[in-house]
Amino acid sequence: MSHTTKDKAKLIARIRRLKGQMEAVERALEAEVACGEILNLVASVRGAVNGLVVELIEDHIRMHVVDPDKDPDVERAQGAAELIDVVRKYLK
């Protein structure tokens, strides 16, 4: 079973929140809200998208490459954990 299938409800909930955030950007543009406020809304969307990407990449590593919590090879487990940490920091 794919991790996207297993976590489907959680991922769809994130997507729905993202849609709501994008709709807020659209409403702000329609209402001619100040550009600073629109930029803040867009920054929130970007952060939410990055969070989704991090979750998908981390789950992909754990399911299809190596799960650092379960791999008996200490070096490989440490490498996977470091990769996950780098992805989290890079997309934060």
Image (cartoon, rainbow, N blue to C red):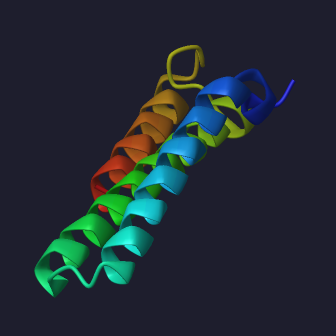
**Which percent across, then down, holds residue 5?**
80, 29
Residue reaching furthest to the front: 31
- 25 left or right, relative to 76: left
Q: Is residue 7 above or below residue 92?
A: above
Q: Is residue 86 above or below residue 80?
A: below
For image coordinates 42% across by 35% down, the residue present is 81
For image coordinates 19% across by 69% down, the residue present is 40
Q: Nearer the viewer, residue 22 or 9?
A: 22
Q: Is residue 42 visible?
A: yes
Q: Nearer the viewer, residue 19 or 68?
A: 19
Q: Nearer the viewer, residue 59 or 19?
A: 19
Query: Quarter holding the C terminus?
Result: bottom left
Query: Quarter holding the N terminus?
Result: top right
- Where is residue 72, by image quadrant? top right
- 50 left or right, relative to 71: left
For image coordinates 31% across by 73% down, the residue present is 28
**Which percent across, then down, holds residue 12?**
65, 37
- Where is residue 2, by image quadrant? top right
Q: Is residue 63 above or below residue 16?
A: above
Residue reaching furthest to the right: 1
Q: Is residue 46 above or below residue 92?
A: below
Q: Is residue 91 visible?
A: no
**Which percent across, then down, holds residue 19?**
54, 55
How many numbered discs? Answer: 0
**Which percent across, then down, holds residue 35?**
18, 85
Q: Nearer the viewer, residue 46 or 85?
A: 46
- 56 left or right, relative to 50: right
